[in-house]
């Protein structure tokens, strides 16, 4: 399952805007990969240092299973979409996205809720 982790979002960013950003980011990945709503997670960790928040927004996509159909072009396109969707909320910020392919053979286990 791809996990989108976005750093640098200021604490005063409203919950309403955060939910919209969450929807935009997850929707971009879901649409591009043709996966379901519950198959992408997103997190916005709080930064303990408040100085500079909102000036740099860094996005990491982890858990991006390495599959033949997930080519470099697809990863680049998803990174571009995530940067553009985030930049719409933070027009003055530097926004970067790093997609980290993951091979589940290197260690993966999942257990659904009971």
Image (spheres, grey):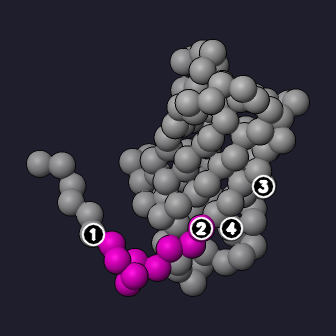
Which of the two labelled residues, at mark 4 and mark 2, occupies the earlier sequence position?
4
C-alpha gap between disc 4 and disc 3: 9 Å
| Residue picked out by circle 3 | 80
Q: Is residue 103 magenta?
A: yes
C-alpha gap between disc 1 and disc 4: 23 Å
Instruction: Tell me if label 4 and label 2 are in contact, CB under 8 Å.
Output: no
Helix, strand or loop at mark 3? helix
Q: Is residue 80 left or right of residue 112?
A: right
Q: Residue at x 55, y 47 (%)?
A: 5
Q: Residue at x 33, y 72 (%)?
A: 108
Which of the two labelled residues, at mark 2 and mark 1, occupies the earlier sequence position?
2
Dot 4: within a 10 Å radius of its alpha carbon, few (fewer than 14), some, or many (20 or more) residues? Answer: many
Residue at the left extreme, as displayed: 114
- Magenta stretch in the rendered image: 100-108
**Label ID, residue 75:** 4
Which of the two labelled residues, at mark 1 and mark 4, occupies the earlier sequence position?
4
Q: Residue at x 54, y 18 (%)?
A: 15
Which of the two labelled residues, at mark 3 and mark 1, occupies the earlier sequence position?
3
Q: Is residue 96 above or below residue 56?
A: below
**Label ID, residue 100:** 2
Q: Residue at x 76, y 29 (%)?
A: 52
Dot 2: within a 10 Å radius of its alpha carbon, few (fewer than 14), some, or many (20 or more) residues? Answer: some
Helix, strand or loop at mark 2? strand
């Amino acid at each position: 399952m791809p996990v989108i982790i976005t750093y640098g979002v200021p604490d005063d960013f409203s919950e309403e805007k955060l939910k919209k950003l969450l929807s935009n980011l997850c929707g971009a990945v879901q649409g591009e990969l043709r996966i379901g709503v519950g198959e992408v997670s997103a997190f916005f960790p709080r930064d303990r240092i408040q100085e500079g928040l909102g000036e740099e927004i860094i996005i990491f996509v982890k858990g991006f299973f390495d599959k033949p159909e997930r080519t470099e072009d697809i990863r680049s396109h998803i990174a571009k979409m995530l940067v553009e969707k985030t930049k719409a909320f933070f027009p003055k910020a530097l926004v970067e996205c790093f997609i980290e392919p993951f091979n589940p053979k290197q260690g993966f286990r999942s257990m659904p809720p009971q």
